[in-house]
Image (cartoon, rainbow, N blue to C red):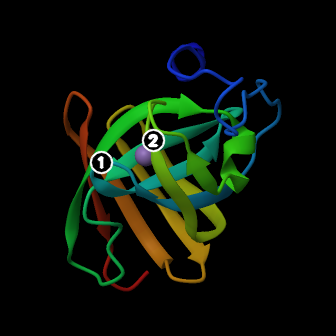
Amino acid sequence: MKIYQEKRDFTRTSEPAGEIADGRGSRFVVQKHQARNLHYDFRLEMEGVLKSWAVPKGPPVEPGVRRLAVQVEDHPVDYIDFAGEIPEGQYGAGTVEIWDSGVYKLEEHTPDRLEFELKGKKLAGGYVLVRTGGKNWLLLKRKNK
Ligand code: MN
């Protein structure tokens, strides 16, 4: 959260400054972020923050498709509703819109692998996030399940 806050000037951007939330949530969001490069920010509410990955090509909607997902800094839970403009000159300047949202059920959680079931409008079913090295992960949709 500190990294998130240090990168931003909350007197200039309307993004939430973020307080550490307590309790465990089970919501997820995908924010389409038209910054210098278009990407999709995939965020899971977990351990009082939003664990976050930038997915350049967007999360897969079909099984068998793997997408690079680069882990980025944890975001505050109230970022889950954020949509709008991040001003020019600010970190991530550009337009954020909610591409999908819903809830998820965590099935497996190790430092290098997350398995979960998503229930969103566009994304539904079993997904896996597996770390391939450092901040790089792959996000894929499982077959069936
Ligand atoms: Mn982003």
Residue ID at (56%, 23%): 8
For image coordinates 53% across by 57% down, the residue present is 96
| 70, 145: nearer the viewer | 70
Nearer to the camera, 10 or 79: 10
> How many other residues sit within 10 Å of disc 1, few (<14), some (14-19) or many (≥20)?
few
* Residue that appears at 62% across and 63% down: 104
The relative height of residue 72 versus residue 35 in the rendered view (above or below) is above
The image shows residue 125, relative to residue 75, as above or below, that is below
Report, in whole angstroms, how far the alpha carbon at label 1 lies from the one at label 2: 8 Å
Secondary structure under the numbered disc 1 in the rendered image: loop
- Please state the horizontal and vertical placement of residue 131, each as a whole percent of the image: 25, 40
Q: Residue furthest left?
A: 133
Note whether 113 is above or below 10 in the view shown.
Answer: below
Of the numbered discs 1 and 2, the one sitting upstream in the chain is 1
Image quadrant containing the C terminus: bottom left
Specify whether 84 is left or right of 111: right
Number of marks in the image?
Answer: 2
- Residue holding disc 2: 93
Please state if 109 lies on the left or on the right of 83 as rendered: left
Mark 2: which secondary structure? Answer: loop
As drawn, the label of residue 134 is: none
Give whichever of 126, 62 is nearer the camera: 62
Task: Kindly indicate whether the residue at mark 2 contacts the one at mark 1 (C-beta within 8 angstroms).
Answer: yes
- Quadrant in the picture for residue 10: top right
Type of the residue with mark 1: Arg
Q: Residues within 10 Å of mark 2 (few under 14, many from 20)?
A: some
| Residue 30 x, y percent position in the rendering | 52, 62
Three-letter code, disc 2: Ala
Q: Quadrant of the N terminus?
A: top right
The residue that mark 1 highlights is 36
Residue 33 screen position, x and y as percent: 44, 56
Residue 126 x %, y %: 44, 72
